[in-house]
Structure formats: C-alpha cells, structure tokens
Amino acid sequence: MKTETLRIRVEPELKQKAEAVFKGLGLKNSEAVRMFYSWVVASGGLPFTAKAPNIETLRAILAEPGEKAYGSFSALRKDADV
C-alpha cells in the first residue's frame, strides 16, 4: 500500500506524554495517528465532542496574563467602585 508522510508540530512535553500513553497501549506514534484518522473517517467526525467555547471561556482565553476578565459591564463597574 502506498503511504504519505504527515508532519505535525507539537510541544515536546505533549509529545512525550502522548508517547508514554501509546507505549502503554503497545502502539507506535504512527499507529496511533492511523487509528485516529481511521476513526475520523469511519465515524465522520472526531472521537470526542468538540464545542466552541462559551463567552466566559473565550474571554479567559483572550485575557492578557494578569489581566482580570469581567463577565459583564456591571461587574466591571462594581469592581471599579463606579
């Protein structure tokens, strides 16, 4: 069977942790990726629920480090004592 090369970039710590899980399951990285791709094709989707973040989560993701995020304008006013 003809194959293609897949190149991805991930953080070293994530790679090491995933490889430890794969090793515990008796899998090589390439086998795990093939299994993932096969699952996506067979199920027509991801093997987990993917949801868009709600507004509160999105605000937290976009907030600068150390910056306080507010859920509403009234919460901001209350904190600012206005």
Image (tube, grey):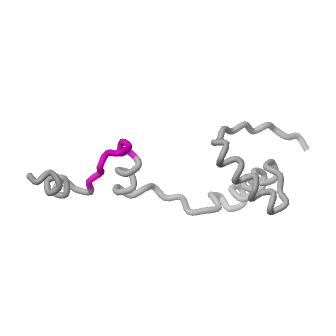
Q: Quadrant of residue 35?
A: bottom right
Residue 46 placement (x, y as % from top left): 63, 58
- How many marks overall? 0
Residue drawn at x 65%, y 61% is 47
Left/right placement of residue 66 relative to residue 30 reads left
Residue drawn at x 26%, y 53% is 70
Residue drawn at x 17%, y 55% is 79
Left/right placement of residue 54 relative to residue 4 reads left
Residue drawn at x 31%, y 45% is 67
Numbered range of the magenta stretch: 62-70
Q: Nearer the viewer, residue 38 or 63?
A: 63
Residue 20 placement (x, y as % from top left): 75, 55
Furthest-right residue in view? Answer: 1
Q: Nearer the viewer, residue 33 or 20?
A: 20
Height in image: 2 above or below 45? Answer: above
Residue 34 placement (x, y as % from top left): 78, 51
Magenta span has 51? no
